[in-house]
Image (cartoon, rainbow, N blue to C red):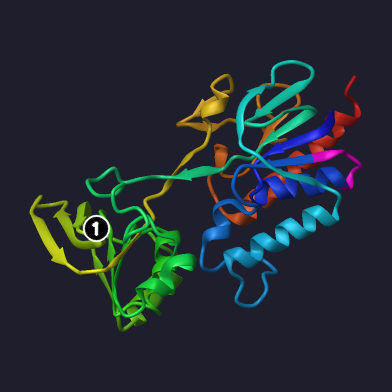
Amino acid sequence: MFDLVIIGGGPAGISSAIYGASRGLKTLVLEKKMIGGLIGSVSTVTHYSGIIEEETGESFAKRLKAQAESAGVAIIMEQVVDVELEGRVKKIHTEQNTYEAKAVIIANGTIKRMLGIPGETEFEGRGIGLNATRDAEKYRGKEIFVVGGADGAIKEALYLSQFASKLTIIHFEDQLGAIQEFQEKIKQSNNISVMLHTRLVAVEGNDCVDTLKIQDEHTKDVKVIKAKGCGVFIYAGSTPDTELYDFLDKKEGYLVTNEKMETKIQGVYAVGDICVKQVRQVATAVADGAIAGVNAANYSKNWK
């Protein structure tokens, strides 16, 4: 029996764990893939107060893990497959074990959205579906394409442009959705071009991607681009990982919480990008975790 079990080891989950452990709770984090979540795979961490110089997603994730462990948080790498949260004792089932808790904090985060286009699955890891930090060096001196126009996509495009002979941003809207800082850097780059109101509709090739089909959103005309051995990095947004929580209130797939980060079930909280909220950033995820951790500690200490 744990005082507190947290499902998900991203910034929100680790923040929850640290605050819970600091208040004397026997605390467990269950993470299916890697501590840090999606932030661990980004090239750089920006706009978060107090980051170290040249902070990468990987370095940030390592420091999250070290801080949690030093606080006495138990971390187990197992995938949660089912939950029973409506009873007094909460039960969390992984592929290997079952854990019991007085309180639970849901911090699953989001899942990267796929484009669902021809060739996307077939060329996974062979030109498409790539990780900028891990795969950029493989495409040094080659053409690189980045799909997406929000902050995350443009930040990764700026990083990848250091490796590319030419980098093209493909975005379906009429203008980029990134903040001004990133847009100014795009304008200052000498090897980045932007294709607006266009959509990637297919990739083709033999051993690797060498052909992209791009559709104009206005005219619906399809343009074929030949770029043998190119890299295609997709940042098409994400969807909340809420499949296990159909018994909780949701809005557009996101979990509904109150100001204490409580769901409608007593002793069950939700934090980070999985929640209904205006801003989804590391800073707001950590804040959610602090609020939930403090309130979960109060709940757990009064648990009977």
Give the image location of residue 214, x and y in percent. 17, 57
Which quadrant is the C terminus positioned in?
top right
Name the one closer to the observer, 91 or 258: 91
Can you identify the residue that label 1 sits on? Answer: 174
Give the image location of residue 72, x and y in percent. 86, 49
Give the image location of residue 265, x and y in percent. 69, 21
Occupied quadrant, residue 270: top right
Q: Say whether residue 216 is left or right of residue 256.
A: left
Residue type, numbered disc 1 = Asp
Name the one closer to the observer, 220 or 130: 130
Query: Which residue is situated farthest in the top direction here?
Result: 87
Taking the spot 62% from the left edge, 31% from the top edge, the residue there is 95
Name the one closer to the observer, 301 or 225: 225
Taking the spot 79% from the left edge, 17% from the top edge, the residue there is 88
Task: Tell me the element at label 1.
Answer: loop
- What main secondary structure does the magenta stretch of the protein show? loop
Taking the spot 71% from the left edge, 58% from the top edge, the residue there is 64
Q: Which residues are drawn in magenta? A: 22-27
Q: Say whether residue 42 is left or right of residue 293.
A: left
Give the image location of residue 126, x and y in percent. 33, 59
Q: Is residue 244 above or below residue 127?
A: above
Q: Say whether residue 289 is left or right of residue 298.
A: left
Residue 3 included in the magenta stretch of the image: no
